[in-house]
Each structure stands twice: as structure tokens, then as C-alpha cells.
Image (cartoon, grey):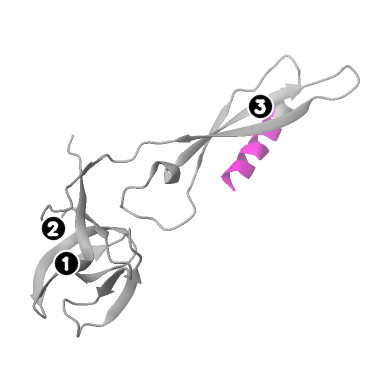
Amino acid sequence: MALGGAVLIALVLLFVWGSQALKPPAIQVALPLIGTPSPLPVAATEMPAVATVTSILAATPTSAPTYTATATLTPTATPALTLLSASASIRAGIYVKAIKPDGVVLRKGAGFDADYVTTLPMGTILYVQQGPADADSLRWFWLSDGVRGGWARQDEIVAYAVKKTP
């Protein structure tokens, strides 16, 4: 939708400038990512992007000028992380990674009797909000993927990373 708006703006500029002698400047448009917002870091291939729309005017002696818009995606920076050893202790304020092939089960409370929330797949990166809590002879941590949250067993996760401090 943002790119369509940029094309409309470019067409208005073409109409206003109308002359081959004037060349409109490049237009920068921020393209929002479609998906779920998340406070978690994202991989370089999933970074938010900025599109640069460059106008190109071309004319021949027998035709009117034509307009072509092109978009170039440029990744923007995300918070840097410091990776942790998988043997590092799990605590509130760090990111963990789901390691069980069946995924990590999130519950509304610590313990097997707590209501089920969801199961997130192996490899999911989660932020530790609270914990540990002891229930059913296990340690539990309250985790969030930025959309869903719940209590998970310690044996389903390993320490992954912390945000770098400036």
C-alpha cells in the first residue's frame, strides 16, 4: 500500500513538473512489515526495510514522457545481541531457545495442572519474563515470543542471548 502511494505521489510530481528539463528527486518510503509485532530480535532477512523510489523520465521526439518507479529495499539496524553459552543459567531478562523436537509447551501457570496455552516449535527464540518457579519437581519460567506467553519447563529451553548494553 505504501509503494502504491509513492507511485501516486510520483505521478502527481510528474504532472506538476511536466517538463523534460526538470527531474523529480528520489522519494523514500518506509514499508511496514506484515506480520506479528515482536520485541524479539529478527534475522537479517526479516529486518524492517526502507524502499527508495527513484523516478526515471524517458522521452522520444514523437511520444510524451513516461514514468517508471523502481524500489530498492535496504535493511535497517536491529538491537545487537550477545550470544550466551547453552550452559549459561536461565534467568529473567535473557532470551532462550526451544530445544525439544516436539517444541516448548506454554501453560497459564507453573506445573502440569495449569491450563495449556500453546506449543511453540523447536528453535523458537523466547524472552524470559519471570522465574524460576518450582512445581512438580521441575523449574519453570514465564516466557514470551512477543505475542503469546506462558510458563515452560526448564528442560525444554536453553539460554540463548542477552541484549548488548551500549
Residue drawn where x is 64% and y is 36% of the image: 9
Marks 3 and 2, how far apart at CA = 52 Å
127 horizontally vs 30: left or right:
left
Does residue 20 sit above or below 15 in this rendering?
above
Q: Amino acid at mark 1?
A: Gln
Residue receiving disc 3: 55
Residue drawn where x is 64% and y is 23% of the image: 24
Marks 2 and 1, how far apart at CA = 8 Å
Asked if the residues shown at circle 2 and circle 1 are in contact, with their CB atoms under 8 angstroms apart, the answer is yes
Residue receiving disc 2: 90
Residue 55 image offset from top left, x and y in percent = 66, 27
Q: Amino acid at mark 3?
A: Ser
Secondary element at image label 2: loop
Q: Residues within 10 Å of mark 3 (few under 14, many from 20)?
A: many
Residue receiving disc 1: 154
Residue drawn where x is 12% and y is 65% of the image: 131
Residue 40 image offset from top left, x and y in percent = 31, 52
Residue 136 image offset from top left, x and y in percent = 11, 81
Q: Amino acid at mark 2?
A: Ile
Ranked by sequence position, the earlier of labels 1 and 3 is 3
99 horizontally vs 111: left or right:
right
Residue 159 lies in what quarter of the image? bottom left
Residue 58 lies in what quarter of the image? top right
Comparing 117 with 21, the one in front is 117
Marks 1 and 3, how far apart at CA = 55 Å
